[in-house]
Amino acid sequence: NGTAPPGAAAFSPDGKRLVTVAPVREGGTQGPSLVRVWDAKTGAVRGEMELPIGGGSGYAAVADSGSVVLSAIGRVVVL
């Protein structure tokens, strides 16, 4: 089990955070996707959310305000 390399990434407008989306591997098969928010300077994970759907690495975007993260996998969009 583990996380595959990110398939999507986006910086916050101020450049202080990086959002990544990566599929999770479960027993050799693709499971859900994991959205992580990183501190761009230190590399520390500041937050994460597992999306119950897999099927790809998806898309990532951060609003101009920096307070909203958008992630999309297939036809599902999560704010």
Image (cartoon, helix red, strand yellow):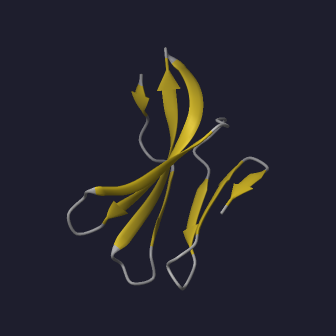
Residue in the foreground of this view, choosing between 8 and 72: 72
Q: Residue at x 49, y 79 (%)?
A: 66
Say which residue appears at 39% left-offset and 65% top-offset.
18
**Placement of the C terminus among the 4 image quadrants:** bottom right
* In the rendered image, the vertical position of residue 12 relative to residue 8, given as above or below: below
Residue name at image x 36 percent, y 78 percent:
15
Taking the view exactly as shown, the residue that stands out farthest to the top is: 27
Note whether 32 is above or below 44 in the view shown. above
Instruction: Identify the image quadrant of residue 11.
Output: bottom left
List x then y, in percent, for residue 33: 56, 40
Residue extending farthest to the left is 42
Q: Is residue 44 left or right of residue 47?
A: left
73 sits left or right of 40 in the view: right
Which of these two is toward me, 52 or 61?
Answer: 52
Give how far across and how far down residue 30 sits, in percent: 57, 26
Instruction: Count every numbered label the image shows and give the total.
Output: 0
In the picture, measured across the screen, residue 41 lies left or right of residue 52, that is left
Residue at figure coordinates x 44%, y 35% from the top left? 4
Rendered view: 4 above or below 17: above
Res 44 → quadrant: bottom left
Counting from the top left corner in percent of width and height, residue 1 is at 42, 22
